[in-house]
Amino acid sequence: MQKVNFWNGNKSSARQSYETALLQACLNQTEQECGAVDVQVDNTDYPNADDEANIFTRDADILVTVAGNVKFNDKQKLVIPQALTKGLLGYRLLLVRDESLASFAQLKKIQQLQSLSIGIPQTWADANLFRHNQFKVIERGSLDDLFLLLKNGTFDYVALGVNEIEDVFTHRVASIGGISIEPSLMLYYPFPLVFYVTPNKPNLANRLEKGLNEIMANGQFEALFTHHHGDVAQRLNLRNREIFTLSNPVLPTNMSHFSGALLD
């Protein structure tokens, strides 16, 4: 049986669960034609950007990351240019200190948010995106460090994708106390997640792309997305929030017209 090594670290458990299930569905779809696959999942976190960028030298075969991730710019890889989560990660809600909730509720213009500071973990792909959009970025520490720094006033807010913010809040933030998910605002920028495949396995990349296209056509993708994220728009009241839209300067040319479909 063929073995496939899927590196699924540096992300929340909610993302890990969905992305593993999606990969398995793509490979299962092509099993009759291409044979069975044993997927080995590696959830190791690599906080150092160079370690992440060189993940294919650590025997990884596949990973999921944002399209155009600058850490991989000079690395050989095979990219499947098909968005995996309807752009979910680009819909961002804010975590703020409880004493700041009233002032955030008064924000009506993006310039007001730009005048405050956003905390982003070191090596995250969206730090440069926020800088490009004239936000005040403080890039510091790991994901777990982020919330203590927020509590201590190092920056004013944190922005996380709607597909992970509840999971992160429950498991990493709630016990700290004094921090809430801000209920009235949302950021949006085109931020599609895609499969990157090792350049040494073009047949695997072709198989994965074929399987992904087939499950998108036969309804399996929609069922999987609904199972993991189906009521997120209603649960987090996304349609009734003030939305501030940002641009993404690193979207690849072949995905330059991508737009999130969560609220369609």
Image: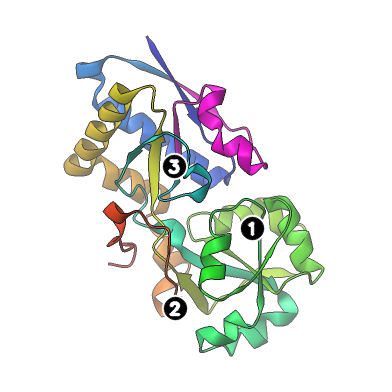
Which residue was labeled with disc 1?
Answer: 169
Classify mark 3: helix, strand or loop: helix
Amino acid on which disc 2 is placed: Ile
Q: Nearer the viewer, residue 178 or 92?
A: 92
Please identify the residue farthest to the right as the structure is shown: 152
Q: Residues within 10 Å of mark 3 (few under 14, many from 20)?
A: some
Q: Quadrant of the C terminus?
A: bottom left
| In this rendering, position of residue 205 left or right of residue 132 | left
Query: Picture quarter containing residue 104?
Result: bottom right
Query: Over which residues does the magenta segment extend?
Result: 39-64
Say whether residue 12 is left or right of residue 263.
right
Instruction: Name the mark nearer the viewer: 1 or 2.
Output: 2
Q: Which residue is mark 2?
A: 243
Residue 55 within the segment the image draws in magenta: yes
Residue located beneath label 3 in the image: 18
* Badge 1 amino acid: Phe
**Residue 105 picture location, percent across and down:** 59, 86
Looking at the rendered structure, the secondary structure element under dot 1 is helix
Q: Find residue 150 and report its horizontal and vertical position in percent.
A: 74, 66
Vertical placement of 69 versus 184: above or below? above
Query: In the image as oriented, which residue stretches furthest toward the left?
Result: 217
* Label 3 vs 2, first from the N-terminus: 3
- Residue 129 lies within the magenta run: no
Q: Earlier in the sequence, mark 1 or mark 3?
A: 3
Q: Residue at x 30, y 45 (%)?
A: 81
Residue 2 in percent (x, y) is at 38, 13
Question: Which of pointers 1 and 2 lies earlier in the amino acid sequence?
Answer: 1
- Which residue is most to the front? 74
Disc number placed over residue 239 in the picture, else none: none
Task: Report the quarter where the N terminus lies.
Answer: top left
Classify mark 2: residues with Cα within 10 Å, few (<14), some (14-19) or many (20+).
Answer: some
